Image (cartoon, helix red, strand yellow):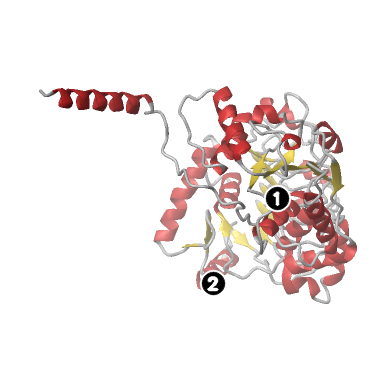
Amino acid sequence: MSKEATEKLKDIQGLLKDGRSHSNVVAVNHGMPRAVERIPRPTIQDQITPSKTLAEIMALLSDDGVQRIGTWGMGGVGKTTLVRSLNNKLKSFPSVQPFGIVIWVTISQNFDMKKVQKQIAERLNLASIVGESMERLINRLYEKLDKVENFLLILDDVFEKIDLNYLGVPRPEDHKGSKIILTTRFLDVCRHMMTNRQVKVAVLNDDESWQLLSKTAGHVASLEHISPFAKAIARECCGLPLALVTMGAAMREKTKDFSIEISELAKCWLAEGLLDDRENYEDSFNRVINLIENVKDSCLLEDSAHEDTVKMHDVVRDVAIWIVSSFEDGCKSLVCSGIGLSEMSVVELLNSLKRIPFMNNMIIRLPDCVVQCSKASMLLLQGNLPLDRVLEKFLQGFEALRVLNMGGTNIHSLHLSVLQLGELRALLLGGCCNLKELPPLEGLSRLQVLDLFATDIRELPRGMENLSNLKQLNLSQNIHLTTIQAGIIYRLS
């Protein structure tokens, strides 16, 4: 072998050795990231109050004396939407971008340092190295950002002080032209983060509230017999965009073939005893999926446009309603959903009824009398926005009830009479954004599903720890539920 070939061989062996030492580096795009990435968000174009706040923050970005900006306000007031609008406004700048890069990071209440560092690294197109120490990642983030001419770091939904040194982010005071914006519910967090300016995000005024709710709800909010109730609901939402959009969406007119969430079917089927209640919720849900696939194969259900939903063809629906309305063997149903009713007819509420769906109407009040429906297992009242109370006598004749759905109504509290429903398996109150309190629930020992999504409760009802059969508890988007008594969740099944 020639001397030259020997030297070449040594070079090749050296390169192979270097390659093995970098085998833990994951492939990555080393191209320069775009200065701003557009983020989906609701429009605030026609809302004067948030538009003024946005203009104020934009002006602060041009102020060389301001490096840290805190935007604060109560949950649901629109802080995230406001800052997303700011991000997209920077994206649409016709001239030179004011920042070399804009980085959006979602923090949330359960702050995870590594997760946040990963978000920043991905935005900077940094390579991911398996087994890399936190110190090494911090250094790489710092070096990358230090080379950027200037940056804007947006920290959304901050609940506590965050040390920028541990994130790997240079102090904006030491990096000319760079700035940080944070959103938080608490003014103290702004102070702990040493913001130069604090901008409070105000609620919408009455006119803006009505415009947002009516725009979300569509023409149904302007109907003569609905408009007074819709305006009252808008006032009850106290100018909070999240509450207004939630209630507006619940009001929006639904067609006969609107999407049905598979999770809702799972709740009802489980509560009705159509599934084995000895299974855990995950197994039951999987069984629902399999059953739905069988029904779809028979062309009785169809895939909907939305993920995890199905729909029923209007002809199939009409036949199904005719069938369940004709039974006389204890399975008879009274289907009165989505037909614009303002009240329930006591004459039609017969003792032979098994299922009573009155959802998506405009029912104002329930009958103030005992209704003998001792065989009824399901009462569906969701989506009746004007409905603001449950009268004492009404539920007394529903002793066999297993499913009660009052989601998306305007009720402020739940009457003690609900505690007489000893067979109740599912209590669904999601979207009742004015529901502030619940009675003690320890008497509902057979309850399996409790849905309190997007309510206004301040604390969990007493007796929760005794609900030993509870399989699903939904507490998401409860912006005023800030504390849960220690041990309650642990004691649930």
Residue 318 is situated, as x and y percent measured from the top left of the image, at 55, 71
Q: What residue is disc 2 on?
A: 314
Residue 343 is situated, as x and y percent measured from the top left of the image, at 80, 67
Q: Amino acid at mark 1?
A: Leu
- In screen coordinates, is 255 left or right of 81? left
Element type at mark 1: strand
Distance of label 2 from label 1 (alpha carbons): 25 Å
Residue 365 is situated, as x and y percent measured from the top left of the image, at 84, 61
**Is residue 24 visible to the viewer in this orientation of the structure?**
yes
**Is residue 367 visible to the viewer in this orientation of the structure?**
no
Q: Amino acid at mark 2?
A: Asp
CA neighbours of label 2 inside 10 A, class few (<14), some (14 to 19), many (20+): few
Residue farthest bottom in this picture: 224
Numbered badge on residue 458:
none
Q: Residue at x 65, y 42 (%)?
A: 105
Mark 2 or mark 1, earlier in chain: 2
Judge by depth and name the residue closer to the eye, 480 or 53: 53
Element type at mark 2: helix
Q: Quadrant of the N terminus?
A: top left
- In screen coordinates, is 429 left or right of 262? right
Q: What residue is disc 1 on?
A: 404
Q: Residue at x 44, y 49 (%)?
A: 290
Q: Residue at x 64, y 33 (%)?
A: 469
